[in-house]
Image: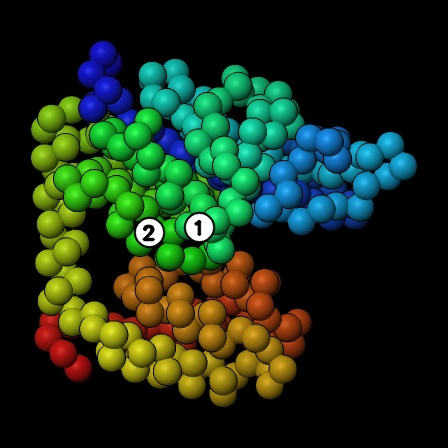
Amino acid sequence: MSNEAFRPVVAIEVTGLLGLPLPASLETRFLTGTGAEITFRRDAYPTRFVGAPGWDERGEHIERWAFLGRGVLWVKGALERGIEVVWSSRYEQYANTYFSPALGLPELPVATTDDGRFHTTEADWKASQLSQAAYADRPLLWVHDELTSAGRHLLERYRKPKMRALTWSRFIPGGASDGDVRFMDEWLRHAVSPAGHAELRAMRARLVDKRRRLDLSTERVQREWATVRSRLADVVDAGSGLAAPLAAYAVDSAGALDLRVVERIREDWGLPVDPPAEALLPLLDLPRGTGSS
């Protein structure tokens, strides 16, 4: 592919798609994929969006990671097809230092290189840099593990209007599923040809039209959020912080809820006494039809 306009860029994070840090007590042999110990060094470690670990007297910290085979194989396959894969990682350039060798990946270009001092959130930090000149006129698939839609909206806003239809964000919190791989491969298949670009633009037009027909006004979104939050308040513990972020996810992802995401939010915000994700999922349903409600 000599024409850069038809050579897509895939921007990836370490966690979610490729691996997860493990508690010391968990046996990696019970997980799909492979495990490894990563030795981080204090003099080669990001400081903005990754919390500092407990360094030993040598300025080192060892973490056990599980590497998720399906995601790693997918990245290697993309590279073999000539697709440019770049790090959009909170580990910055150190993703190459620590993770590329452990994953059997070559050194990848780093898209997130500044120190983030002018960005209040990790999503804004990544989205603003992915929109820069190096990728401005190329199809862009962003694979991330962040529990927010803000990054997706920011990325679309930062990109040139003509490139917004050739931009997609895929949220993968804990290992790529078969469905994730199928979707990403299909998107990339469209991204490499003029006919495929036309199809992606048609998909974008249908999405914009659907949003318009669903009347996603600020007032309606606020009303839906309050409805779901009220449902959740009836079942979660009074001391739990789960209701608000789950309600936000329900509104943003109506009609496309993912149990894995609900599990992740529950783990991050809930209490052990809160209902399991399987019981919470039906409470998030917001069927939407045409017109206003």
Q: Residue at x 64, y 73 (%)?
A: 271
Quarter the C terminus occupies? bottom left
Give the answer, above or below, for where 53 lies relative to 281: above
The residue at which mark 1 appears reads as 123
Which amino acid type corresponds to the residue marked 2 in the rendered image? Answer: Leu
Could you tell me residue 133's position as x and y percent?
30, 30
Left or right of 256, for residue 290: left
> As drawn, which residue projects farthest toward the top?
2
| Residue 32 visible, this orientation | no
Q: Quadrant of residue 144?
A: top left
Q: Confirm or deny contact between disc 1 and disc 2 (CB under 8 A).
A: yes
Name the secondary structure under disc 1.
Answer: helix
Q: Residue at x 20, y 16 (%)?
A: 3
Give the answer, above or below, for where 224 lies relative to 109: below
Could you tell me residue 240's position as x and y percent?
60, 78
Left or right of 79, for residue 197: left
Could you tell me residue 262's position as x and y percent?
47, 63
Give the answer, above or below, for where 147 lies relative to 274: above
The residue at which mark 2 appears reads as 154
Name the secondary structure under disc 2.
Answer: helix
